Image (cartoon, helix red, strand yellow):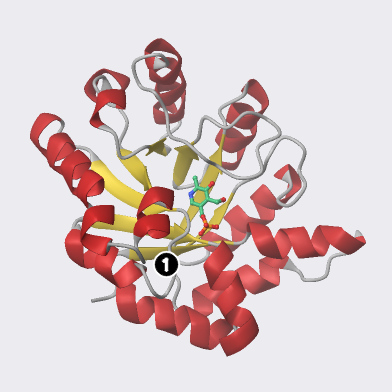
Amino acid sequence: MTALSVNINKFALVRNARGSNMPDIINISEKCLKYGADGITLHPRPDERHAKFSDLTPLQNLVSKYEKKEFNIEGYPSKNFIEKVINVNPDQVTLVPDPPGALTSSFGWDCEKNKSFLTDVIKEFHNNNIRVSLFINPSIKTLENLDIISTDRVELYTYDYAHNYLKNKSEAIKSYIAVVRFILNEFPKIEFNAGHDLNLENLDYFLKSINNIKEVSIGHALICDTFEFGLEKTIKKYLEITSK
Ligand code: PXP
């Protein structure tokens, strides 16, 4: 069983296109949760072109009404981001190394280069009882210091898997299996999330190949699927895969 966290940034992007509150992302998030999603993810970027920092508190208020659902905030840990996240106090923060203008997250942390920075930042979140997940590449050489950094979880960046899946899925999953094995051996307390470019076609094989994924966060494909199936049916289709 893997938790499904719906990344609602793309709904926020549509909302921002007209400067009004349509679609209302709180209302959409509430529907996602009622239809069975286990959580909501939001990634406010510094330019707020889709999610806004002012969306965080209403979303936290919504998700905290549900006993077992979680709010996950993603982003680069700038001073402003850290302050805002601590103020909102979500269940989880996922730290990404994106530069400010990034179109989307496109690489994971180098834990050697960022060792002391990440260690300090994670300490700050832990002091405020917020679980931390670090966005990582499927590459063992970037992960030597995970125990010192003291992260609770890692989020496997699944772009490479998703983009190689159609060519050769058993090849596409190999580096992920290797990274998961390495972490389970070296740092057995660390848990796993996964995300980026996961969809109705490639999700099942990923979760069957790596059976200890705690949470997937899915945005782009899930929102595209709602054009065809509607929100309720789309969430159910993803849950059929994640709840196996
Ligand atoms: N995880 C992270 C760190 C992301 O930045 C994103 C995209 O915002 C996702 C997961 C979800 O990716 P997708 O929108 O391709 O499902």
Determine the residue positioned at 54% across, 68% down: 221
Report the amino acid beneath label 1. Answer: Asp
* SS at mark 1 in the image: loop
The foreground one among 161 and 182 is: 161
Q: Nearer the viewer, residue 134 or 131?
A: 134
Q: Where is residue 231 in the image (x, y as percent from the top left)?
A: 58, 82
Q: How many labels does the image show?
A: 1
Residue 170: percent from left, percent from top: 21, 60
Q: Where is residue 129 in the image (x, y as percent from the top left)?
A: 41, 35
Quadrant, the N terminus: bottom left
The answer to whether 135 appears left or right of 19 in the picture is left
Position of residue 63 in the picture relative to residue 117 (left or right): right
Q: Which residue lies furthest to the front in this view?
A: 167
212 left or right, relative to 23: left
Query: x%, y% of residue 30?
Result: 60, 72
**Which part of the image, by quadrant, shows the C terminus?**
bottom left
The residue located at (47%, 40%) in the rendering is: 93
Residue sticking out furthest to the left: 185
Give the answer, above or below, for where 155 lies relative to 62: above
| Residue that carries the numbered disc 1 in the rendered image | 38
Q: Give the residue displayed 67% in from the left and 61% down from the top.
A: 10
Q: Label 1 neighbourhood size at 10 Å, few (<14), some (14-19), many (20+)? A: many
Depth order, front residue of 84/114: 114
Asked if disc 1 is less than 8 Å from ligand 1, the answer is no
Q: Residue at x 76, y 69 (%)?
A: 24
Q: Quadrant of residue 61?
A: bottom right
Residue 216 versus residue 146 in the image, above or below: below
